[in-house]
Image (cartoon, helix red, strand yellow):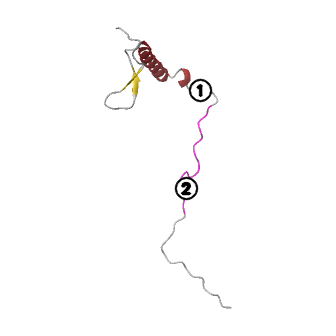
Amino acid sequence: MRFDNDEPIFKRRRWGNPRYTYNPNNPIGLALIIGSLTVGAVVMILMHTRSGPFAPPDDTSYSPRPAATWNVLPTYPTFSRAPTPTPTKLTP
């Protein structure tokens, strides 16, 4: 594989897309491609093995939250469609 140092590091994508990609014909562009794939693979392995920054905390004092003993769902007042009773006058 022959590298051309005059090639740009980033190349414009085809089909009128305004995005840029790494250029594998440039040594720095190829190094960026290999570095990106390596970092991605290491992160995926760390996530799969749950190690490094993805490790669960070593806190042994953890205890699950107790079960709720109250009604979790709020109760709302019910309104009936019956007419409201009118107060009556009391005569002595």
Identify the image quadrant of the N terminus.
top left
Identify the image quadrant of the C terminus.
bottom right
* Residue 18 to residue 84: above or below: above
Query: In the displayed image of the protein, which residue is found farthest to the bottom?
Result: 92
Q: Position of residue 89 (x, y in %)?
A: 63, 87
Residue beneath disc 2: 74
Instruction: Answer left or right for 54 relative to 9.
Output: right
Region in magenta: 62-76
Marks 2 and 1, how far apart at CA: 34 Å
51 drawn magenta:
no
Q: Position of residue 37 (x, y in %)?
A: 43, 19
Amino acid type, callout 1: Pro
Amino acid type, callout 2: Pro
Query: In the displayed image of the protein, which residue is found farthest to the front?
Result: 6
Q: Position of residue 6 (x, y in %)?
A: 40, 14
Q: Nearer the viewer, residue 82 or 33?
A: 33
* Residue 87 to residue 78: above or below: below
Residue 66 quadrant: top right
Q: Choose the circle earlier in sequence order: 2 or 1.
A: 1
Residue beneath disc 1: 57
**What's the residue at 55%, 23% (across, down)?**
53
